[in-house]
Image: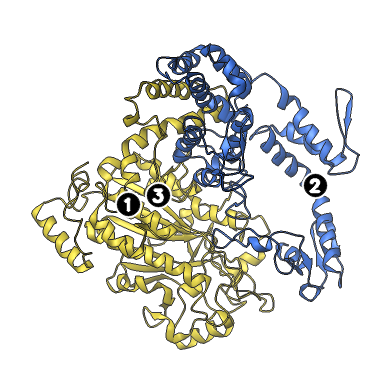
Chain colours: A blue, B yellow
C-alpha cells in the first residue's frame, strides 16, 4: 500500500533554479530548493493504475495533479483521519493525554465540519473544516475546566517557551541567538532533523503511564538550558540590536510596565505569576521567591538599577517554575 | 581533580606504539596516568564494563558497508547494484568472502587485531521467519514485527528489543534498571528510546566545552547572596509536589539535572588539553581535532564517552551503557557520486564513522580499558539491494553490523549473509519483477543483544525480561563476545 502511494505521487519536483536565498546549513539540508510550490515533471509520473485506501482507485493515465487529488481524497475518506487530526490538535493546544471522549468530540467536529458552543455555531458543514475543529479543541469542557486531572497538561516546547517569555515581558527579537538556544534545547525551530519533526507524538514520560511529545527533546541538559536561556535573557540582559544592521532588534525584554510593581516584591511576584500561569504561587514557594526578589534594593544595587533587578529575578523564577513550564 | 596535567604542554604527539608502551609501564608500576586515573580506581578498571551503542540513524546501507568479494557473489552484487557497486579492487578484504567499504580503512587494524567482528543480516523478528511464512501470514500477525520499513517504527523495534513498535522502554534502559546501575543510559545523541526505562530517562550530556549546569546557580556561583537566594527559591519551586503528573516528571528531571551536573559537570565540560583532560584520550582523538575539539559529530560524542569511562569513579557505577548517534544515513538520493561509487555521501558518512570509532578504540587501548568496553552498531534498517533511479537505496530490513572491543571474538564474521538474489529465499517477495532485495533477517536483534548483555552480566532470568522474544530463539548464544 505504501508503494502504491509512492507511485501515485511520482512526478513532482522542486521549482527550477531554487528560490531560497538562505544558506544551506546544516549539511544535508536542501534549503535552496525548499521555497515555492512543487512543479510537475510528467515524464517522471507513473501512469499505471493504483489502488489506494478507502476504495479509491487512481485510473491509468491519470496526470500527477489528478493522482494527487485522489491521494488526498483517499486519506480524507478514511475513518481514521478525524481521530488522528483531533488527537494531534489537542496535543498541541491543550493536553498531551486527552480522554478518548474528548478526541471523539473533536473528531466529530472535524467529520461534520460543524461545532457549536453556548449557542455560537462554528464551521461550514464541510468535512475537515478547521474553524469547527479548532473551536471544538479549545472550547471543550476538558480544555476549560478548572478542576485539575492528574493526566492533563503539556510541556511547553522550547520555541513556545522562548516566545512565551518574550511576549509576556513585552520583548522583541529579530531571531538573534534564537537558533543557538534552539539548538541547545534540541529545537532549532526552522530546521527539524527529519520529516518526523523534533519529537514523536507518543514519547513515553518515564515514571508515568502517560505520553509527552515535548518530553522527546527534554532531558537533563535541556532542564539546565531552559534556566540558562532565562539567565541570558533576563540576568545577562539578552542581545542588543546590532548597529551594523538597520533593522536589527536584538533579543530583549522591556520591563517598563512592571517597574511600578517593583517596590513591593510580593506584589511583583504575584503579578508575574498571574500573567505567566494564571494563579499565584502557594506560600511554600512564594516566600523564597519573594525573598530572592527582595534582596535587591538601593543598598545592594546602589546604581539605581534595583527595580530592574527585581523584575529580572522575579521573571527568572516565575518563568523557570514548573507551574509555567508545564501548561495546565 | 585540579592536579596539574603532566608533561603535555610542549610535547609532540605520541604515537600509538609509544602510548601502549607507556601505558604498560605505568600500569605495571601502579602509577596513575593523569588527573582522572586516580579517580578511576584500579588500573584496567577491575570489574567495570561498558557497552557503547552507536546508532547509524536513517538506516545504513550494510551491503555497501560490507560487500561480498568472492567471485560468484561479487558478480551478483555488481550486476544488481550497478552504479552503486564498489569496484572489487577498491574493497578492503576481510576474509575470502567479504570486505569493507574503502572509507572504513581505519577499522582494518582492529579486524587484524581480532577486536572487530561483523554480524550479518540481523534485524527485528518475533521468531524465526521464512519467506513462505512472511508471505502467507495475514497483515498484523504478531509473528511479523509491526510497521516494517518505517523509520520511526523500525528504529523503535531495534531500540526496544521487541516486535511491537508501541513498546515504551528500550533494551539498554531495561538492562540498566535490572542491574540497578547508578546512572541510566548516558546519551550523547538525544533521548532515544534505547535508554528509556519505566522510571528513568537517558542522561543526556552536551559535548566537550559546553556548560553542563545552570549559570548563576552552580556551587561556585553561590558566594553571591543574590545567586544563593535565587538558588534557594528555584530549589523550592522544583521540590513542590505538582498537581499534574507531567509537571512532577518535569521537576524530577530538573532535580536530577542539578545533582548529576554538580557531580560531573566539570568533567563533561573538560576540553582537550585542560587540567581535567586525559592525554590518553586526547592523543587518540588528536587526528580528528579541529580548532582543538573533535571535528565531527560522532567523534565529539565518542570523545565524551571515552571521558566518562575514564572518569568512572565520579560518574559512578561498575556497569554503564552509553548511546551515540550518527545521522544522515537515509541515502535515497546520490548515495554515491555519479562518476565514482567509492566517493559521495555514503563514503563520507562511513569515513566519519570509522575514524571516530577507531579513535575511540585507540583511547580505550591507551587507557588500558579495552577489555572492559564493547562498542556495537544499530540502525533503523538495511537498504534495498536494488538501487533506485536516483543513485540511492530505499528502506529494507535485515542489515549488517559491527562489534568492536577487547572482549569481542573478532577477525570473524557471525550470522549468515543474505543470498543476493532479487526474489530469492531471503527476500520479502518471491516475485523477481517486484523484488528490490529487502532481506528477512536470519539473526534477531534479541540474539545480537543477548550476547552483548550476557557479557555485560545479565543472568538468564533478567535476559528474558529485557528481551521477551528471546524464548523464540532457543539455540546457542552467538559467541562473538
Q: Nearer the viewer, mark 1 or mark 2?
A: 1
Residue B218 versus residue B83: which sits nearer the camera?
Answer: B218
> Where the C terminus of chain B falls, by quadrant?
bottom left
Q: Secondary structure at mark 3?
A: loop
Residue B189 versus residue A272: which sits nearer the camera?
Answer: A272
Q: Is residue B139 above or below residue A314?
A: below
Spatial CA span between label 1 and label 3: 19 Å
Residue B314 in view (yes/no): yes
Q: Position of residue A78 (x, y in %)?
A: 80, 50
Chain of the residue on which disc 1 is drawn: B
Q: Are marks 3 and 2 on the same chain?
A: no
Residue annotated with mark 1: B50
Q: Nearer the viewer, mark 3 or mark 2?
A: 3
Q: Secondary structure at mark 2?
A: loop
Residue annotated with mark 2: A79
Spatial CA span between label 3 and label 2: 46 Å
Q: Is residue A211 above or below residue B27?
A: above
Q: Secondary structure at mark 1?
A: strand
Amino acid at each position: 500500500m505504501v508503494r502504491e502511494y509512492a507511485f501515485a505521487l511520482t512526478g513532482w519536483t522542486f521549482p527550477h533554479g531554487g528560490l531560497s536565498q538562505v544558506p544551506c546549513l546544516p549539511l544535508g539540508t536542501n534549503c535552496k530548493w525548499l521555497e515555492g510550490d512543487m512543479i510537475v515533471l510528467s515524464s517522471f509520473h507513473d501512469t499505471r493504475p493504483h489502488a489506494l485506501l478507502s476504495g479509491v482507485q487512481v485510473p491509468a493515465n491519470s496526470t500527477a495533479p489528478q493522482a494527487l487529488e485522489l491521494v488526498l481524497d483517499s486519506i480524507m475518506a478514511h475513518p481514521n483521519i478525524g481521530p488522528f487530526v483531533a488527537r494531534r490538535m489537542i496535543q498541541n493546544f491543550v493536553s498531551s493525554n486527552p480522554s478518548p471522549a474528548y478526541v471523539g468530540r473533536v473528531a466529530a467536529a472535524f467529520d461534520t465540519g460543524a461545532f457549536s458552543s453556548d449557542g455560537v455555531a462554528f464551521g461550514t458543514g464541510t468535512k475537515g473544516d478547521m474553524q469547527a475543529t479548532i473551536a471544538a479543541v479549545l472550547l471543550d469542557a476538558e480544555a476549560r475546566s478548572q478542576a485539575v486531572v492528574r493526566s492533563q497538561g503539556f510541556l511547553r516546547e522550547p520555541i513556545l517557551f522562548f516566545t512565551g517569555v518574550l511576549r509576556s515581558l513585552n520583548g522583541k527579537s529579530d531571531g538573534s541567538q534564537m537558533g543557538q538556544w534552539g539548538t541547545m534545547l534540541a529545537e532549532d525551530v526552522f530546521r527539524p532533523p527529519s520529516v518526523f519533526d523534533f519529537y514523536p507524538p507518543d514519547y513515553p514520560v518515564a515514571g508515568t503511564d502517560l505520553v509527552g511529545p515535548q518530553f522527546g527533546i527534554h532531558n537533563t541538559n535541556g532542564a539546565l538550558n531552559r534556566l540558562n536561556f532565562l539567565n541570558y535573557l533576563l540576568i545577562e540582559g539578552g542581545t542588543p540590536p546590532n548597529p551594523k544592521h538597520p533593522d536589527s532588534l536584538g533579543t530583549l525584554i522591556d520591563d517598563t510596565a512592571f517597574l511600578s510593581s517593583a517596590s513591593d516584591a510580593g506584589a511583583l511576584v504575584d503579578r508575574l505569576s498571574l500573567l505567566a500561569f494564571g494563579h499565584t504561587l502557594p506560600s511554600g514557594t512564594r516566600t523564597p521567591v519573594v525573598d530572592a526578589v527582595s534582596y535587591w534594593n538601593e543598598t545592594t544595587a546602589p546604581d539605581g538599577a534595583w527595580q530592574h533587578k527585581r523584575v529580572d529575578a522575579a521573571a527568572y523564577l516565575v518563568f523557570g517554575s514548573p507551574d509555567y513550564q508545564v501548561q495546565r | 581533580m585540579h592536579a596539574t596535567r603532566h608533561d603535555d604542554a610542549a610535547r609532540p604527539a605520541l604515537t600509538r606504539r609509544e602510548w601502549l608502551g607507556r601505558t604498560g609501564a605505568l600500569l605495571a608500576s601502579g602509577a596513575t596516568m593523569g588527573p582522572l586515573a586516580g579517580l578511576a580506581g584500579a588500573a584496567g578498571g577491575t570489574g567495570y564494563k561498558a557497552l557503547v551503542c552507536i546508532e547509524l540513524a536513517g538506516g545504513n546501507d550494510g551491503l555497501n558497508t560490507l560487500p561480498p568479494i568472492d567471485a560468484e557473489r561479487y558478480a551478483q552484487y555488481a550486476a544488481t547494484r550497478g552504479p552503486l557497486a564498489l569496484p572489487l579492487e577498491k574493497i578492503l578484504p576481510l576474509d575470502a568472502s567479504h570486505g569493507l567499504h574503502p572509507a572504513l580503512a581505519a577499522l582494518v587494524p582492529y579486524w587484524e587485531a581480532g577486536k572487530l567482528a561483523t554480524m550479518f543480516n540481523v534485524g527485528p523478528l518475533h521468531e524465526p521467519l521464512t519467506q513462505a511464512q512472511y508471505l502467507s501470514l495475514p497483515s498484523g500477525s504478531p509473528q511479523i514485527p509491526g510497521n516494517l520499513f518505517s523509520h520511526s517504527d523500525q528504529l523503535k523495534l531495534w531500540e526496544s528489543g521487541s516486535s511491537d513498535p508501541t513498546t515504551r522502554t528500550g533494551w539498554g534502559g531495561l538492562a540498566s534498571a535490572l542491574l540497578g546501575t547508578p546512572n541510566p543510559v548516558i546519551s550523547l545523541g538525544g533521548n532515544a528510546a534505547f535508554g528509556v526505562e519505566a522510571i528513568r530517562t537517558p542522561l543526556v550530556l552536551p559535548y566537550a566545552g559546553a556548560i553542563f549546569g545552570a549559570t548563576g546557580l552552580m556551587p561556585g556561583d553561590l558566594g553571591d547572596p543574590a545567586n544563593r537566594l535565587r538558588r534557594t527559591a528555584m530549589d523550592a519551586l522544583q521540590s513542590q509536589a505538582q498537581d499534574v503528573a507531567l509537571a512532577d516528571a518535569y521537576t524530577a528531571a530538573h532535580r536530577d539535572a542539578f545533582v548529576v551536573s554538580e557531580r560531573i559537570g566539570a568533567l563533561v565540560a573538560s576540553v582537550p588539553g585542560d587540567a581535567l583532560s586525559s592525554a590518553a584520550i586526547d592523543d587518540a582523538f588528536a587526528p580528528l581535532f579541529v580548532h582543538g575539539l573533535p571535528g565531527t559529530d560522532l567523534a565529539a560524542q565518542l570523545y565524551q564517552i571515552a571521558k566518562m569511562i575514564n572518569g568512572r569513579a565520579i560518574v559512578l557505577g561498575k556497569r554503564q551503557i552509553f548511546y551515540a548517534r550518527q545521522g544522515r544515513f537515509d541515502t535515497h538520493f546520490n548515495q554515491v557520486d555519479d562518476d565514482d561509487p567509492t566517493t559521495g555521501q555514503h563514503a563520507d558518512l562511513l569515513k566519519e564513522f570509522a575514524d571516530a570509532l577507531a579513535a575511540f578504540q585507540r583511547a580505550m587501548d591507551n587507557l588500558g580499558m579495552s577489555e572492559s568496553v564493547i562498542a556495537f552498531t544499530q540502525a533503523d534498517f538495511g537498504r534495498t539491494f536494488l538501487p533506485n533511479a536516483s543513485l540511492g537505496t530505499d528502506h529494507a530490513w535485515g542489515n549488517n553490523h559491527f562489534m568492536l572491543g577487547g572482549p569481542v571474538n573478532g577477525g570473524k564474521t557471525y550470522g549468515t549473509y543474505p543470498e543476493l538474489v532479487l526474489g530469492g529465499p531471503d527476500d520479502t517477495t518471491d516475485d523477481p519483477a517486484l523484488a528490490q532485495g529487502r532481506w528477512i533477517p536470519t539473526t534477531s536483534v534479541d540474539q545480537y543483544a543477548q550476547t552483548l548483555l550476557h557479557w555485560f552480566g545479565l543472568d538468564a532470568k533478567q535476559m528474558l525480561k529485557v528481551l521477551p522474544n528471546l524464548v523464540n530463539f532457543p539455540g546457542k548464544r552467538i559467541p562473538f563476545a
